[in-house]
Image: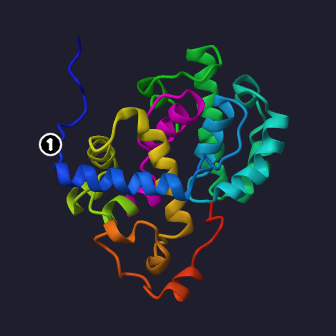
Amino acid sequence: MPADPRPATPRPATSLVRRARKIDRVLAETYPDAHCELDFENPFQLLVATVLSAQTTDRRVNAITPALFTAFPDAAALAAADRTAVEEIIRPTGFFRAKTESIMGLSAALVERFDGEVPARLPDLVSLPGVGRKTANVVLGNAFGVPGITVDTHFARLVRRWGWVDEATAKDPVKTEHAVGALFPKRDWTMLCQRVIWHGRRRCHARTPACGACPVAHWCPSYGIGPTDPEIAEALVTTQGPA
């Protein structure tokens, strides 16, 4: 059996595990409808949409993917597409030339190496052009039901604020992934990420978190970095974040 390539993760303190799981339970009650906010119908669509979501919002990606997938419904079609046509469709997502390179490149790799199908293994996914661990874990968790920790900007910010990871670990997404994964049963990883991301988009904002209207304030060591007055904080809460 090959050695586990993951970095060694120290066993977390029992008190940290209990506090982290309590926060997750409260988030589950607060956001029972939490889910991936990218629209998709199959693994290929989710893979492409996730690559396109870099440096933009899920909402903006959702606005252009219907046209993209109508024109290029599968990996073979996108791999053989006219580059200019793809660029024009995805232009609103920003960095459209680089993103066109990535989604056409990953489509070509899918055709050449995986018979046009999106693989359901992390090593295979990260071997595709433009696909890193974050993208791979989004696809695995939401398209294939394979648990994974997705360390996006919201997730990284909140687990640092909650003290689930220290400052050194927080600087490394892979170390953050494994440190947080050690706090929870593997079966809970995907939904944990959805709830944390929803909370980050709706209440625990980067600049001014709604501390006074936060359901997990009691267990948050960073409580008070945003307004604690309930009325002021409630005005900061959004029903839909900058998805």
Horizontal arrangement in the rendering, residue 153 relative to residue 164 (left or right) = right
Circle 1 crowding by C-alpha within 10 Å: few under 14, some 14–19, many from 20: few
Q: Is residue 144 magenta?
A: yes
Residue 116 position, x and y percent, is 65, 19
Residue 132 vs 215, above or below: the answer is above
Residue 143 vs 219, above or below: the answer is above
Of residues 41 and 84, the one nearer the viewer is 41
Residue 151 position, x and y percent, is 42, 50
Of residues 94 and 214, the one nearer the viewer is 214
- In this orientation, does residue 131 appear? no
Residue beneath disc 1: 10
- In this orientation, does residue 83 appear? yes
Q: Is residue 208 magenta?
A: no
Q: Residue at x 41, y 32 (%)?
A: 187
Q: Determine whether the residue tagged by mark 1 lies in a helix, strand or loop.
A: loop
Q: Residue at x 60, y 22 (%)?
A: 110
Q: Name, please, the residue furthest toward the top.
A: 1
Q: How is the image coloured?
A: rainbow
Horizontal arrangement in the rendering, residue 37 relative to residue 197 (left or right) = right
Q: Quadrant of residue 20?
A: bottom left
Residue 30 position, x and y percent, is 54, 59
Magenta region? 133-157
